[in-house]
Image: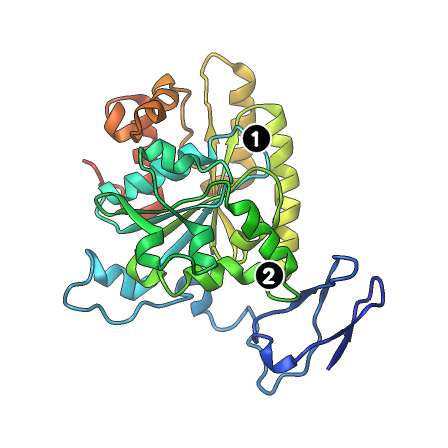
Amino acid sequence: MIITCPHCKKQHNIDEKRIPPNVRMARCQGCGQQFPLDIPREEPVPSPFQPATIKTAPHPAPAPAPDSAPAPTTRASQGTRRIGVSLSKGGVGKTTTSVNLAAGLALAGKRVLLVDTDTQGQSSFMLGVKPKGGLTELVTEELSPKEAIIQARKNLWLLAGGKSLAGLKRLIDRKDYGGELTIAQALTPLEKDYDYVVVDTSPGWDPLTVNVLFYVNELMTPVSLEVMSIQGFGEFLKSIASIQKFRKEVSLRYILPTFRDMRVKRGGEFLEEIEKIYGDKVCTPIRYNVRLSEAPAYGQTIFEFAPGSNGAQDYRELVRKVTGEPNLFT
């Protein structure tokens, strides 16, 4: 069939049978703009509002095998939880939060896959590991899942990022349709082995960030308590709203104030305003703690480097909130 780009009027001859039923957007090869697909389907695409189980168990895990991981009842009942740690502004503690949240969940006995979608690849550095590949090699099938995913700690596995992700961005851009589902198609078959998939994103707004938002169901947004970060948070919310037009499942679940410095009065005022607006979505702030900045140099999480520090205490509290288990680590 012939599809005409509404922007530049370029015509594309495509086979509609090869388009996955959940793809709703196409990208014009002429002008590069995206536009909605309106293709008759033999079977109607389910509405994102149906059924109610979409929000709680988008991909229920199969019945656990005898050698399955700890807490199989949790995975079978609620499915793997997909959490994206994202904000378009840099320097707010996204990677620090992703790594320490994943490590804290692993310490709590959960099986966790940490996915790094940042070209800097800092998650590997923070965990003190040197993988031979990662997300790019998994998507391009240069490496098998067993080769691309490495075990960084007990209960914690890593799918690394790095410079090769620049090539993955180009691969996504070249797709006529379904580019926003590239990461979801790669990760969904693997997630049954984990209780949590935590995805770290890069600053800015690029094809990889959009891909993450088309995969995760829950968003955690670190917001440093200073004016530029607050402004960036407002812009990020507008971008999320544009994604939710096509994917209702993704929702902002956690707002994590970071770099809380009790000596700075303005930071306390920002925190009060955020709590007034977002209520229970606001997590206990991560206090400014020099140990958090020192730990990566030793390839350690905050729980390994300084388990008694304020940073470790605050990230334990974050794990309790995410799991809904207030008695963890006590």
Dot 1 falls on a residue whose secondary structure is helix
The x and y percentages for residue 312 are 30, 28
Rendered image: mark on residue 273: 1
Question: What whole-number distance in Å separates the C-alpha atoms at marks 2 and 1?
Answer: 38 Å
The x and y percentages for residue 151 are 27, 46
The x and y percentages for residue 168 are 54, 52
The foreground one among 200 and 177 is: 177
Name the quarter where the N terminus is drawn.
bottom right
Q: Is residue 77 above or below residue 115?
A: below
Q: Is residue 311 above or below residue 47?
A: above
Report which residue position mark 2 lands on.
Answer: 179
> In this rendering, would 183 be left or right of 231?
left
* Residue at the spot 35% in from the left edge and 61% down from the top edge: 190
Residue at the extreme left = 66
Rendered image: mark on residue 145: none
Residue at the extreme right = 9
The amino acid type of the residue labelled 1 equals: Glu
Dot 2 falls on a residue whose secondary structure is helix
Classify residue 230 by image quadrant: top right
The foreground one among 159 and 245 is: 159
- Visible residue check, residue 249: no
Q: Is residue 40 above or below residue 172?
A: below
Name the quarter where the C terminus is drawn.
top left
Instruction: Judge depth for marks 2 and 1 and give the one in front.
Output: 2
The amino acid type of the residue labelled 2 equals: Gly
Circle 1 packing at 10 Å, graded few (<14), some (14-19), many (20+), is few
